[in-house]
Amino acid sequence: HGWPDLPQLWSKLIEEFQKEYYCVTLELPNYNKNRIQNKWGYEFMDIVRAVAYTIQDRILSKSPHSQVTLVIHDWGALIGLVTNKFYPHLFNRIAAIDVGDNGKQSEWSTYQKLFTMGYQW
């Protein structure tokens, strides 16, 4: 999921999908303020590696021939896209929903960058 949405956004969809598919949901570190693990945050690539490890550990280690579809949403999509870039062998498909990043931040104006930074606070 992405910010400012909560994991519960997906509850009803997962309920339906679990009738036919094995679903794994991820909560990004420090997203839940009641369980902050590192008050200074995490390096971006540490989160990417954690996502890859979770897919490997929770799905592919149990069923190596599984076809994994990564569903990514909003700002969480950036993590999913980078995970796919570095670990493409983990995913068969990606469904990106309400993606806030087009991968071309270097082309953004100063205003766009500042607006995005403010939105994230």
Image: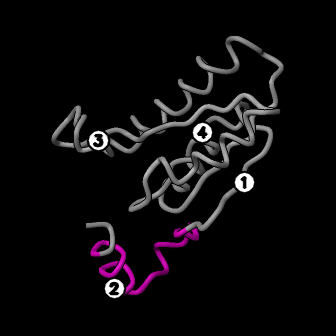
Camera-nearest label, 2 or 1: 1
Precedes in sequence: disc 1 or disc 4? 4
Q: What stretch is highlighted in magenta?
A: 100-118
Q: In this view, does 6 lie to the left or right of 24?
A: left
On residue 52, the disc is none
Name the residue beneath numbered marker 1: 95
Q: Which residue is drawn at 52% across and 70% down?
A: 100
Q: Which residue is drawn at 70% across and 19% down?
A: 60
Q: Distance between the residues labelled 3 and 1?
A: 24 Å
Pick the quarter of the image with the C terminus: bottom left
Q: Which residue is drawn at 32% across and 67% down?
A: 120
Whether residue 108 is situated above or below residue 22 in the rendered picture: below
On residue 110, the disc is 2
Q: Is residue 102 magenta?
A: yes
Whether residue 114 is situated above or below residue 71 in the rendered picture: below
At mark 4, the secondary structure is helix
Name the residue beneath numbered marker 4: 86
Q: What residue type is labelled 4?
A: Phe
Q: How far apart are marks 2 and 4 (CA)?
A: 29 Å
Q: Distance between the residues labelled 2 and 1?
A: 30 Å
Q: Does the magenta stretch include residue 54?
A: no
Whether residue 100 is situated above or below residue 76 in the rendered picture: below
Q: Distance between the residues labelled 2 and 3?
A: 28 Å
Name the residue beneath numbered marker 3: 30
The image's colouring method is: one colour
Q: In this view, does 12 lie to the left or right of 29?
A: right
Q: What residue type is labelled 1?
A: Ala
Q: Crowding at label 4, few (<14), some or many (≥20) Cα neighbours within 10 Å?
A: few
Measured from the top left, where is residue 89 in percent x and y? 73, 31
Q: Which amino acid does label 2 sit on?
A: Thr
Precedes in sequence: disc 4 or disc 3? 3
